[in-house]
Image (spheres, rainbow, N blue to C red):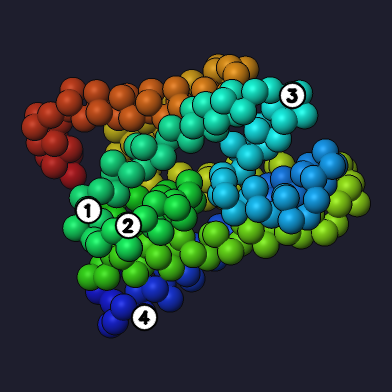
Amino acid sequence: MAYRSATHALAQGARDVLPLTTGIVPFGLITGVTAVGMGMSPSQAMGMTVLFYSGSAQLVVMQLMQSGALPVTMVVTALVINLRFLMYSASLSPQFNRLARRHRWPLAYVLSDQSFALWALKNGADGAGNFPFHYYTGTAVVMWFGWTLAVLAGVLLGTGIPESWSLGFAIPLSFLALLVPSIRSSATLGAALAGGLIAVLAAALPFNLGLLLAAVGGVTTGVLIEQLRGPSGERATQEAS
């Protein structure tokens, strides 16, 4: 998509990601409520949120804090949980590796699952346009504010949110909304099925390692299917059409 200006690209990115913020609100509320419930002050809870900007890592580390784990254990656990961002960064690198550090470092900090998934969907469909930095910035900044405000709301509400609301159910819905439109070939379908199956089978693994295994398994499956299809598979597809 060709944008009229950098401002247009920034605004479009913000508009595209805005519906996805509804999926992180329940997660943020749960995180804020958990922080207050374990005795953290509002300033401590929000400071941790800004420092981490990773809901899954933050929740697990808070559990480790409650159990009296060593600081090194908390750091290593958070790093393991966030290993998926290495794959995200490798995918984004061709677009952003020429940017100045003052641009790359803030983008690395605000990298999120939803922003990357939206970027990958756009980049795979019709490209991210003529202002890729500004488009991605629009998605990432909106996600950061959405997450931070959701955690703040949870901190302010405290333990007043009833469990009957089942807020956690809304979290995977935002990812499904991104996954389904991106399945356009046998390779992407195979990657989605393999990743989903591995995630279910490995859900009991500690430190959210199942998520990392599912990501690696999905990518590997997609690459293998593409290699098996090869040029002959592409010709067969063209002849069938």
User: Can residue 24 be seen here?
Assistant: no
Q: Residue 126 falls in which quadrant of the image?
A: bottom left
In percent of the image, x 64 and y 58: which residue is there?
148
Q: Are marks 2 and 1 in contact (CB under 8 Å)?
A: yes
Three-letter code, disc 4: Thr
Residue 52 placed where, x, y %?
57, 46
Q: Quadrant of the N terminus?
A: bottom left
**Which residue bears the numbered disc 3?**
68
Mark toward the viewer: 4 or 2: 2
Q: Residue 18 falls in which quadrant of the image?
A: bottom right
Residue 118 placed where, x, y %?
42, 54
Residue 121 placed where, x, y %?
36, 52
Q: CA distance from mark 4 to mark 1?
A: 22 Å
Three-letter code, disc 2: Arg
Judged left or right of residue 44, residue 205 is left
Q: Are marks 4 and 3 in contact (CB under 8 Å)?
A: no
**Which residue bears the numbered disc 2?**
104
Mark toward the viewer: 4 or 3: 3
In percent of the image, x 72 and y 50: which residue is there?
45
Q: CA distance from mark 4 to mark 3?
A: 48 Å
Among the two numbered marks 4 and 3 on one chain, the one whose residue lies closer to the N terminus: 4
